[in-house]
Image: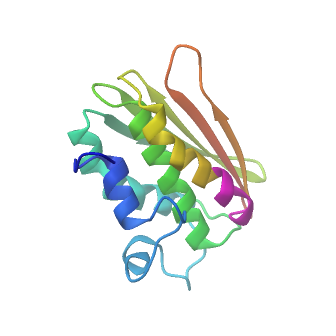
Amino acid sequence: MAEKRASALYVYTTILGAAGGSVVGSDRRRFAAPEHLPPDLALAVARTVQLFGYEARRAGVQLSFRGPETLLVSCDSRDLTDAVGHALVSCIEMARESGRVDLHLEPRGAVAVLTVRAEGGSGRRDEAEPHFQALRRLAPDAGCELSIEHPSAGGARLSLSFLHPR
């Protein structure tokens, strides 16, 4: 990055390390859910929105979340948190300057689906791309089926599906 600006990408790479795609050192303990608890997708989304909410506002991006307060899934909680973080930050970058990012979480039978949609703004695909790539690398380890779409009108739509124990 040529300039030292406080963007969601800069903060995210500082905390998570986009090149490695995972939280490093003691930061993992602050960001990830405790390993002794079952993986909760709703909690991972809430923690990620809390962590990056301020940066989203600074970037002129409105965040909204719809979904249950808890939704257990079958995966590694560390990979789950990293995947949700990369999904959100990539969409924040795609919706910069007056855009919005909507997160929608719902159980659909045997799976839990998180949809993250970026609309409006002046998207920066080059800033978001490292997070799309990290998400593609993390998805198999997280037990996640991933879909990334880039509509011709701009923005992005990500869908992350995890097995949902009943």
Residue drawn 22% across and 51% down?
4
Q: Is residue 119 left or right of residue 114?
A: left
Horizontal and vertical percent position of residue 73: 66, 63
Q: Is residue 91 visible?
A: no
Residue drawn 45% across and 76% down?
24
Q: Main secondary structure of the magenta part?
A: helix
Horizontal and vertical percent position of residue 155: 49, 25
Task: Name the one closer to the observer, 89 or 161.
Answer: 89
Horizontal and vertical percent position of residue 101: 41, 34
Residue 140 on the magenta segment: yes
- Segment tinted magenta in the rendering: 136-143
Q: Can residue 155 be seen in this view?
A: yes
Horizontal and vertical percent position of residue 8: 33, 48
Q: Is residue 107 left or right of residue 61?
A: right
Classify 34 as above or below 159.
Answer: below
Task: Name the one closer to the observer, 10 or 32.
Answer: 10
